[in-house]
Every structure is written in C-alpha cells, then in structure tokens.
Amino acid sequence: MSAAQESRQNGSPRTLISFPFLGILKPPDNSAKGRVQAAMRFDPALAAQEAFRESQGELGPGWETAVALEQTFSSTAGTEAREAYERLLALAQHYPNARSFHAFCIYITWQQAAEEMIAHHFQTGLALCEAYLVAHKASDPVHTGRITELHASFRTGLGLQDEDEILIDYQNDTPKGGD
C-alpha cells in the first residue's frame, strides 16, 4: 500500500505525495516543475516514513515531541502543518548526530517543495542535503544515495544546474593562454 493510500485510508486530510512520475520515463519537460520532477529511484514519502521509524533511538527524550509534530504535519494542512514542519526542522538542530532524523527532515522538505514550489523550500532542502552529506556521508549508503539525488533535484529547482552548465560551456569556449 502506498503512503498516499495509507493516508487516505486513515482519513487524514493531508495526502503524502506518491510521486506518480517515479520510474516512468517521459519526454523531457523543460519547465521549472518538469526539471524538478525528474525520475527518482525511490519514493521520498516512503523514505520519510522509513527514516522516521529509524530515528526513534536517535532522539531520546525528543522522540515524543517528534511523534506529535509528525502526526500534526501528516494529518493537517496549511499553517498548522507548516508550523509542525518548521518545529521538526528546529528539533533536528538539537540532535546533530541523529542521522535518520536529519534524513527524514530532508525527505519532508522535498514533500514541501513538491507541494508548494517556492524558492524557500528548495533553499532549505539544499542546505539540509549539504549538511547531511558532509556530516553523515559514510554512515548510511541508502540514505546518502537518496539524499544525493534530492540534492541534485533541489539544485535543479533553484536553477543551479542550468547555471553550472552555462559556466561549463563558457569555460570550454573561452580561449586559454596561448590559443
């Protein structure tokens, strides 16, 4: 059962994103939304659930707070869900070694970015990915691979991939000394 189906079955008003485009190759969509929704090899909503379960032992006394915030985030929409999301990110700051919880925060940031495509979510996601990859890269190859994919997607959502390609083209076309 997908996360979206489970959410609907539980009667919660907020549906987890199921990313129906995953694994389906389509003609390239050059719009901002199309560039961001490139096929991933995993479902971020399911990865979030998995990482959240794994994080139970990492949070100690913060676990109960995390559970309450996650339930609010998953079962509501609008301001209440956004506040719970922000509080989850703040909680992560108190547990710098909580590898799975940090991965969870990245996955739910992707959900936020997919639901509301604003630069703030992509910037937050990019910063979270970079911090995770620096601090936890060697500790979990599964989450590291997924977060590396999300890092590229957050960069694309901000248009940074295009800038990199333009810079590379410029550098290749620029005459070098002695040319």
Image (cartoon, rainbow, N blue to C red):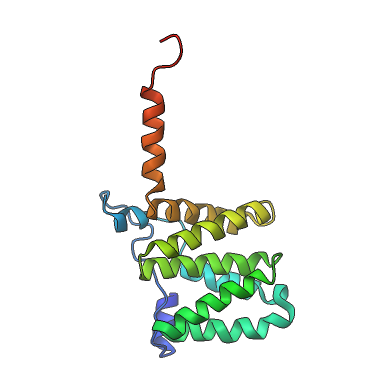
Towards the viewer: 35 or 46:
35
Towards the viewer: 63 or 159:
159
Q: Is residue 150 left or right of residue 29?
A: right
Q: Quadrant of residue 179?
A: top left
Residue 45 location (% of width, % of height): 47, 70
The quadrant of the rendering that contains the N terminus is bottom left
Q: Quadrant of residue 33?
A: bottom left
Residue 22 location (% of width, % of height): 38, 60
Q: Residue furthest front?
A: 177
* Residue at x-position 66% and y-position 86%: 64
Q: Is residue 100 left or right of residue 80?
A: right
Whether residue 88 is visible, yes or no, is yes
Q: Is residue 133 above or below residue 69?
A: above
Q: Quadrant of residue 118?
A: bottom left
* Residue at x-position 35% and y-position 65%: 117
Q: Is residue 168 above or below residue 54?
A: above
Residue 44 location (% of width, % of height): 47, 65
Q: How many marks?
A: 0
Towards the viewer: 165 or 5:
165
Residue 49 location (% of width, % of height): 54, 74
* Residue at x-position 69% and y-position 81%: 62
Q: Is residue 18 above or below residue 163?
A: below
Q: Is residue 176 above or below residue 30?
A: above
* Residue at x-position 42% and y-position 83%: 79
Whether residue 1 is visible, yes or no, is no
Q: Residue furthest bottom?
A: 11
Towards the viewer: 126 or 58:
126
